[in-house]
Image (tube, rainbow, N blue to C red):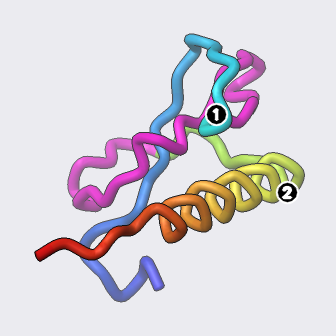
Amino acid sequence: MNNALSSVIVIPLTRSKKDWPTRVDISVKGESGQACIEHIRSISKERFLEKINSVTKLEMASIRKHLLAVFAESTLTIKKTR
């Protein structure tokens, strides 16, 4: 899907560790950090300078699990407005 678009969906990374349900522990170039699910967004491909790393299959599975939990929770809290 990302090949056909001029933008990509990204999950920012941080070295600051929080015990939050929207954070996933990952390792980038041997340093521990977290993927910040709460800051997911779309950005232009032009903003990328270089690829620094890829997540492991285990990290990606954990990210997917957290994304599903976040979006499932948000669908439960949608309320009708006038």
To which quarter of the image does residue 44 belong? bottom left
In the image as oriented, which residue stretches furthest toward the top? 16
To which quarter of the image does residue 3 belong? bottom left
Q: Where residue 20 sits in the image (x, y, percent)?
A: 64, 27
Q: How many C-alpha atoms fall within 10 Å of the one at disc 1: few (<14), some, or many (≥20)?
A: many
Which of 1 and 63 lies nearest the eye of the viewer?
63
Instruction: Say whether residue 15 is left or right of residue 1.
Output: right
Number of the label disc, if any, that sits on residue 45: none
Magenta region includes residue 27: yes
Number of the label disc, if any, that sits on residue 23: 1
Q: Where residue 64 sits in the image (x, y, percent)?
A: 71, 61
User: Which badge, 2 or 1, comes first in the chain's sequence?
Assistant: 1
To which quarter of the image does residue 18 belong? top right
Q: At numbered mark 1, what does the secondary structure look like: helix, strand or loop?
A: strand
**Residue at coordinates 34% horizontally, 54% vertically from top-left?**
41
User: For the magenta stretch, what is the residue range?
Assistant: 24-50
Whether residue 40 is situated above or below residue 33 in the rendered picture:
below
Q: How many C-alpha atoms fall within 10 Å of the one at disc 2: few (<14), some, or many (≥20)?
A: few
Q: Where residue 58 sits in the image (x, y, percent)?
A: 88, 51
Please, what is the three-letter code of the amino acid marked with disc 2?
Lys
Which of 48 and 39 lies nearest the eye of the viewer?
39
Q: How many marks?
A: 2
**Residue at coordinates 73% horizontally, 18% vertically from top-left?**
32
**Residue at coordinates 55% horizontally, 37% vertically from top-left?**
52
Residue denoted by label 2: 57
Whether residue 41 is situated above or below residue 50 in the rendered picture:
below
Magenta region includes residue 78: no
Instruction: Say whether residue 71 is left or right of residue 53.
Output: left
**Residue at coordinates 70% horizontally, 36% vertically from top-left?**
24
Q: At numbered mark 2, what does the secondary structure look like: helix, strand or loop?
A: helix
Q: Where residue 53 sits in the image (x, y, percent)?
A: 63, 41
Please, what is the three-letter code of the amino acid marked with disc 1?
Arg
